[in-house]
Structures are given as C-alpha cells and as structure tokens.
Image: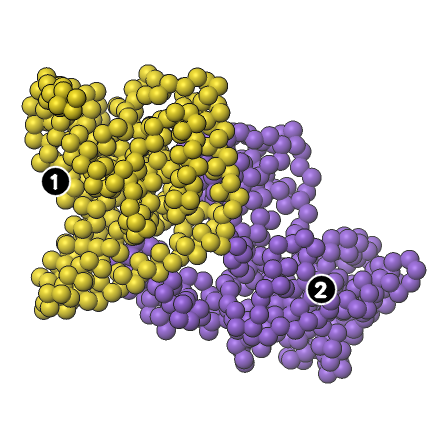
Chain colours: A purple, B yellow
Amino acid sequence: MLARLTQTKPLHWLGQQLLNRDNPAAWLDPLAETINPMWVQEHTPVRVEQIIQETADTRTFVLAPASRWQGFEAGQHVNICVEINGVRHTRTFSLSSSPELWRRQGQITLTIKRLPGGLVTNWLHDNLSPGQTFALGAAFGEFLIPRPARPVLFIAGGSGITPILSQLETMADSNYPQPVTLLYFVRSQNDVIARARLEALASRYSQLSLRIISADESKEPRFLSASDLDAVPALTHRDVFLCGPKGLMDLASQLLAGKNVAPDRIHSTFFAPPTPVVLDGDALGGQVRFTHSQVEAGSEGDANLLEIAEAAGLKPQYGCRMGICHQCSCRKTSGTVVNRLTGKVSGPGEESVQLCVSVPRGPVTLDV
Amino acid sequence: MKQLTDAQLNNLQKDLDAIRDEVVADLGERDARYIRKIIRLHRALEVGGRVMMPFGFIPPVFIAATASLGIAKILENMEIGHNVMHGQYDWMNDPALNSQTYEWDTVCTSTSWRRTHNYEHHTYTNIIGKDRDYGYAVLRLSDDVKWHPGHLLQFVNYILLTVLFQWGVGVHELESEKLRRGQLRWRDKLPFLKEFVQKGGRQAFKDYVFFPLLTLPVAPIVLAGNVGANLIRNIWASTVIFCGHFTQDAETFTEEECEGESKGHWYLRQLTGSSNFTGGKWLHILSGHLSYQVEHHVFPDLPAHRYPEISGKVQAVCKKYDIPYNTGTFAKQYGTVLGRIARFSLPDSVRTRLENRRQLQAI
C-alpha cells in the first residue's frame, strides 16, 4: 500500500524534498522492519516459507516475495541480497518454480547447491530458516521458452537443472505442443535434483522424454556423447538449451556444431561464473582517475576497475564481482576498457561500465 | 609542534596503522547493529518530534517536541551523516549507508561537505592558509593572521556563526574571502551557488514552510518549534566542532613545515592539532564521537563508536613518542575555546601583555 502511495509522482517528489533521498519510501524502513520485515520498501523483501532437502548438498528454498514483486518468466534468474556479518552480498540464482506458482500462491523457489568454499551458498544453507527474510531483485534473463512453440532439447548438468525445472513445469501446464527432450547429467544417482518432480512431469506430460545420465554409470566417467544426440529425434529442428558446468557446455556446443545445429538455435545460461576470456595482458592496465574521490591509481595487467579502486583505498558498491548483478555499475567519463568476460573493447567516451569486469586499456576516468 | 625524526615518524605510522588494521579486521555485525540502532533512534525521535509539534500549544509538549526534533537532527548530522560520509560504513555495501550517495539533513550539500571537510579539512588539518575550517575565514584564532580592528567584534561573529551554523557550513565552499579579495570570480562559483540554493531551499521549505503549513491552525507553533530544533542542532554542532580544533593547546601548522610530508608526519599533525573532551556515553553519541576528535582525525574512516575502544591504544602511542594527547572535560575545553576567540580578537600587543600578566600571576 505504502509502496503504491509513494509511487505517485508528486508524493514521491515531495518525499525526496523532505527526506533528502531518492527513495523516500525507504526512510521508515529501520522502524518498519522491526515490526514486520515484509514492510521494507528499499528492496522487495522475500520470506522463507519452507526448505526442502533435494540432495546432500542441494536445497530448495520456497519463498514468498512481497506482493509488489513484478514476477518472472520461466527460465529467468534473480539477484538476491543477504547480509552476512554486517556486509551485504548479492548473488544470482535461477528460479526453479513455474511462474504459475507465483501467480496462484505468491510463491517462488530457488534451488541452491552448496558451492565448496562459497560464502553465500553455504551461508544460505547453514543460516536460513522459515520465517527469515532477505532481499529479492527483479527477474531477468533471456533463457526463455520458444514462442511460437518449436521442438526443444534441454541439456542440463548438476544444478544447471534449476531454470529448466521452471520451464518444464510451465510447458507441462500449458501443454506445450512440441516434443521436448531433457538430457540431465549428474555425478551420481544421489545427485539428481528434484527427481520426483521430474518423474511426475514425465508421466503427466506426454511430450516430455526424460533421460537422467549419471557419470558413474560406467567405469569411464560417462559424459555427453554424439550418440546421446543421435538418439534425439529431429535434432536439427530443435531449439537447444544448455545449462550446466563449463565442461558440459563446451562439449555440448562442440557436438551440436558437428550435428549441424545452427548456432542461433542454441541458448546457454550459466549457473556458475562465466570464465573470463584470455586477455592480452601487455596492452592492458593504465592510469585510472576516480574524479569523485579525487584519487588516481595506476594498474598493470588484467586487474579490473573494482580491484584497482579497492587497492587505492576506495570502497565502491559491488555485488557479485563477476559481471552479473550490476551493483557496481558506474559512469566512465573517458578512456577505454575491456570487458573481462566477453573480451569486448569499449568505446572511448562516456558510458556506464561494470567495475568488476572492466579492465582498463590505457588511461580511464571514472565518476567514482 | 613536536619534532620527531624521520625514523620516529615511520614508527609512529606503523604503530597507528597497526591499531587501524586490527579494527578493520574486526569490522562486522556489531558495527552494523550499532549504526542501525542509532538510525532507528533517529527515525523514532524525528517522527515523534514532528507528530508532537502541532500539540505544542501545551508548553511541556512544545519542549518535548522541539528537543526530540533537535536531538534527531543532531544524531542524523553527527553520528549518522558525518560518519557515513567519511566512508565509515562503506564496507557494509549498503546503499543507504554509502559515503558517496548519502545526503544529510542540513543545508550543506553532501558533495560540498565531502570536498571541504573530508578532503580539505582532513588533509590539511590546522595548516593556516590551507585548512579553511581553521576559523572558517571569519574568526582570527592564531597570530598567523594579521590583526585588524574588525577582529575586535569577532565574538559577535562567533555567536552569529554558532546560531546560523548550518547556513555557515552551507556557504563555506563559496570561499567568500577569496571572492572579496578578487582571487575568485562569482561566475566560478555559480555551480556551487546553484546547489547551495537548491539544498538550502529544500531544507528551509521543509522546516519553515511545509510542516507549518501542513498544520495550518497551529503554524506559528510548529514554525517556532522547528526553528528551535534547528537552533539546538546549530549551537551543539558548532560547539562540538570548535572544541575539536580550537582549544588552548591544539596546534597550528605552516604550509612550509608540511610540504611533501610523510604519512607519519600527517599522523603527528592530526594528533597534535585535535582535541578531545570527556563525558558520559550519551555525550559521545550526541557529538558523533567527535569528542574523540584525536582518534577521528587519525582514523576518519573507522566507525566512530570504535573510538572509545581504541583511545587507550592511541594514548599509549602518544606517550611512547612523548606527543601531547589533548583532552579535558567538556567545560574546560570549551572554556579555552572561548578564551582563544576572545584573546585573538585583541591586538597582539594587548594580548601578549595580558598573557604575560596572567603568567606572572600564575607564578
């Protein structure tokens, strides 16, 4: 209610004047959250409803976002923000439930695997319990069900199944009229996430053919093979969706190319940080001027702007530190930067850059 | 100024850096909880003050409402705004507590404050001619400035500055003294003036137009209360800040002695140019822990509520190098500030004669 009220333009403007902030509705958050954490206006709060143990190291968190959350499409991801020992951390996860669950019951699910040594995933597993709240961002991502409907092949590995669960559920609900095949690679049969859900889907939705392949089936680790693809009818007519560890994604791209699947039919999403492209170290680095803080710092090699700023004693905002969440985006006023993920070279002029994946090439000026 | 060798300055830097590193390594939940608790208190006091104010036709309610709003402004300016803008809580990665985006409840824009205070004052602390906070270009507080008859009236200027403190701080960056001397042109200051008018207008609109009009039948009472709350904040903030650098024994420096200075020398200057005052927990909180001005100047970006905890260590370092650690009760320190303002309003000949007589009497 409050959110809707403060979204009216004149009131929002007035609030900005009275409270000296861009988001006046959040001014009362510190008091509001002590009464009900779901009243927080600064971000969209989400409450943990239930936690389901999927495998030894994977849990599904059933969450109820505040009703003002904008919703999502099957296959999209969200940023979540949690505070660990006083520090806010942002991470991106795929939504594993269907949008229908959100529409009908106001719930979503995130299926999260413990990352060995990972700060946030382990914290979520060890500390979250029903009733707790944290921050949820808007959904984003282009890993979407083809429209109009075309035959689909999903190739998933490990916890890469999560966005596909959302898509399969949605396809089953709408009775997607084209054949759908899922090749799901896991380390062992114990690592199958949401097995019951997948089997129930396969039995109620006749278009779906489900194959779960575990690497430990044979003596030699069992990976995706050309014959797996040969077994998929009308492969070249399918849209292919890849989600899994880098090894699987690379192997799949290679095999699909060999089977003449057009590259524009292949959609990939990463559930692990995308690996940086190899940058030519010699040409990189340069003097970085942080105009706002009146600090200047030099860099060599492939140090990114966030690392350079932090080394110079600055503390710009950041989130995922891997180019996903845009928390660290800021204005570059001049200079050329190279995107660490894509290898793409920026223009020399003013634009918004993500500090955590931008590597200076020559002198750069930032409005930080 | 206390003279130390380069080697001693180096060691001084290492000793102080070690204190800092220890705190930085320990930053976490406790600090986050502390600042959020203060923010909750601020919100409660501000809401309480604003809600009570229209009922200010009952005298005790008027006093409670004005005090509540005044203390809210003090907390917001000193323990929250000033400290957040120093980057004390940037490590939390909370956009609401980010030093570069925080905007505080006073006339001075945060951008201007970060330039004049965080950069100029904290870098060139007490260097006459470089630190424009030393006397705010209005007061003569040392014999580095040549006396002229106008200074006889500087006590009046001091009272005016204190009463209108938020406006004084707001126009500080205008550098009116340089405009007067023709070193700057008005047109150079247009961007600043635009921001000043915008923020000053916004603040005046809020306290002197919007809230009084919102409660029209009792508008004069609300206006009076809001003026009172701003006045309480102005006087308190000015007093605390004056106690930080203008006490009897707080030293001043020349540009020459600071040219190309080392980090160790900068530390030494912060230690000898600042002064603390003692008091209870709430006196420290209400002063934004600027009662630990020495610790604040040595470590401006450590969360201020940590200063009392590290004060013992800083004093031990001072003792080790025989550097004076300037502290005393609030009354004593403020007394020496008033004394300084009064003494330097006099011509040097009169002042030295008085000072000599005082010294003789003391003997």
The answer to whether residue B72 is seen in the rendering is yes
In the image, what residue occupies the spot 11% across and 58% down?
Answer: B224
Q: Is residue A339 left or right of residue B320?
A: right
In the image, what residue occupies the spot 38% across and 62% down?
Answer: A30
**Residue A57 circle label:** 2
Mark 2 chain: A
In percent of width and height, residue B212 lies at 14, 62
Q: Are marks 1 and 2 in contact (CB under 8 Å)?
A: no
Mark 1 chain: B
The residue pinned by badge 1 equals B160
Q: Along the line of sight, which residue is nearer the eye, A163 or B339?
A: B339
Q: Along the line of sight, which residue is nearer the eye, B335 or A215?
A: B335
Looking at the rendered structure, the secondary structure element under dot 1 is: helix
**Amino acid on which the number 1 mark rests in the picture:** Leu
In the image, what residue occupies the spot 54% across and 81% down?
Answer: A104
In the image, what residue occupies the spot 26% across and 51% down?
Answer: B74
